[in-house]
Amino acid sequence: MTDTLGLVHTGWVGGIMVLIAAILTMISYQMEQKEQTQTI
């Protein structure tokens, strides 16, 4: 029971970390795109 809960919790944390990383990557990519268009 405890092991299962721990695995589920780890999965949740991993999923949230992946989501945050994906969002940050998208934001930084959009920022770079905006900077490139401004310089051009």
Image (cartoon, rainbow, N blue to C red):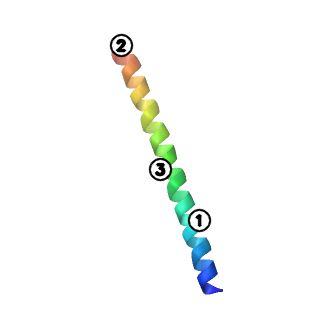
Q: Percent from the top left, x then y, of residue 29?
A: 44, 34
Indicate the secondary structure of the residue bearing disc 3: helix
Front residue (pair 4, 13): 4
Which residue is the extreme one toward the top? 40
State the image quarter where residue 38 is shown: top left
* Three-letter code for the amino acid on which mark 3 is drawn: Ala
Q: Percent from the top left, x then y, of residue 7?
A: 58, 75
Mark pair 1, 2: CA separation: 42 Å
The crowding category of the residue bearing disc 2, from other C-alpha atoms within 10 Å (few below 14, some 14 to 19, many at least 20), is few
Q: Name the residue: 54% across, 65% down.
A: 13
Q: Name the residue: 43% across, 26% down.
A: 33
Q: Which mark is residue 40?
A: 2
Image check: 8 left or right of 21?
Answer: right
Image check: 1 left or right of 13?
Answer: right
Q: Which residue carries the number 1 mark?
A: 12
* Three-letter code for the amino acid on which mark 2 is drawn: Ile
The crowding category of the residue bearing disc 3, from other C-alpha atoms within 10 Å (few below 14, some 14 to 19, many at least 20), is few
The crowding category of the residue bearing disc 1, from other C-alpha atoms within 10 Å (few below 14, some 14 to 19, many at least 20), is few
Of callouts 3 and 2, the N-terminal one: 3
Indicate the secondary structure of the residue bearing disc 1: helix
Which residue is the extreme one toward the left? 39
Whether residue 21 is situated above or below residue 33 in the rendered picture: below
Q: Which residue carries the number 3 mark?
A: 21
Mark pair 1, 3: CA separation: 14 Å
Image check: 5 left or right of 21?
Answer: right
Indicate the secondary structure of the residue bearing disc 2: loop
